[in-house]
Image: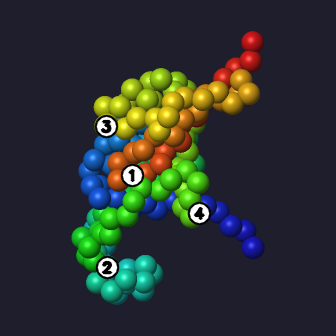
Amino acid sequence: MPIKLENVGIAVRDLEATIAFFTDLGLEVVGRDTVSGEWTDTAVGLDGNHAKIAMLRTPDGHGVLELFEYLHPDALETEPTLPNEIGMHRVAFSVDDIDDALAIAAKHGCHPLRGVATYEDIYKLTYVRGPSGILVMLAQALTKA
């Protein structure tokens, strides 16, 4: 059976702020909608499901995020995910210039959890805490001299 990853869905507390963060990093909004009704109740498993959604695509056309802000039922606040917790972990992006990406993230109040690391002269990488507590990994490939 062939299988293809369609998107990664992330519930957020502020859809507009989250869209601004990811579009500033270079993703493109490719669709927006407000969804509700029996089909969403069935698909998601929540009665009275009503949400604003946005689909964002990476510039290479391969990665898609589905962001959704619940209007009903009320969104449940949880503690931000820690890097070592079991479950949905993070979303990762390759960037051409990690310093530029971090400057963009900083404009949104998002900073590295600890700093920028270098992995075996192959990558510079870091985790930032994005909007709604989303863990976002940024990685820049390094060319060997």
**Distance of label 4 from label 3 (alpha carbons):** 27 Å
Residue under pointer 3: 108
Badge nearest the viewer, 3 or 1 = 1
**Which mark, residue 49?**
2
Q: Residues within 10 Å of mark 1 (few under 14, many from 20)?
A: some
Q: Is residue 144 above or below residue 122?
A: above
* Marks 1/2: CA–CA distance: 22 Å
Q: Is residue 6 visible?
A: no
Residues packed near mark 2 inside 10 Å, few (<14), some (14 to 19) or many (20 plus): many
Residue pictured at 42% horizontal, 56% vertical: 80
Amino acid type assigned to the residue bearing label 2 in the image: Asn
Percent position (x, y) of residue 76? 32, 69
Assign a secondary structure to mark 3.
loop
Would residue 87 appear left or right of 73 to someone viewing this image? right
Of labels 4 and 3, the one closer to you? 4
Cα distance between the residues tagged 3 and 2: 29 Å
Label at residue 93: none
- Could you say where residue 85 lies in the image, as x and y percent from the top left? 56, 59
Q: Where is residue 105? Give x, y as percent.
A: 38, 34
In terms of sequence position, does the residue under pointer 4 or pointer 3 come before the other? 4
What's the CA distance linking mark 3 and mark 1? 12 Å
Viewer-side residue, 114 vs 72: 114
Residue highlighted by disc 4? 86
Mark toward the start of the polypeptide (2 vs 4) = 2
Dot 1 amino acid type: Gly
- Rendered residue at 28%/47% (across/down): 17
Of marks 1 and 4, which one's residue comes earlier in the chain? Answer: 4
Where, quadrant-wise, is the N terminus in this rendering? bottom right
Q: Mark 1 — residue?
A: 133
Name which residue type carries label 4.
Answer: Ile
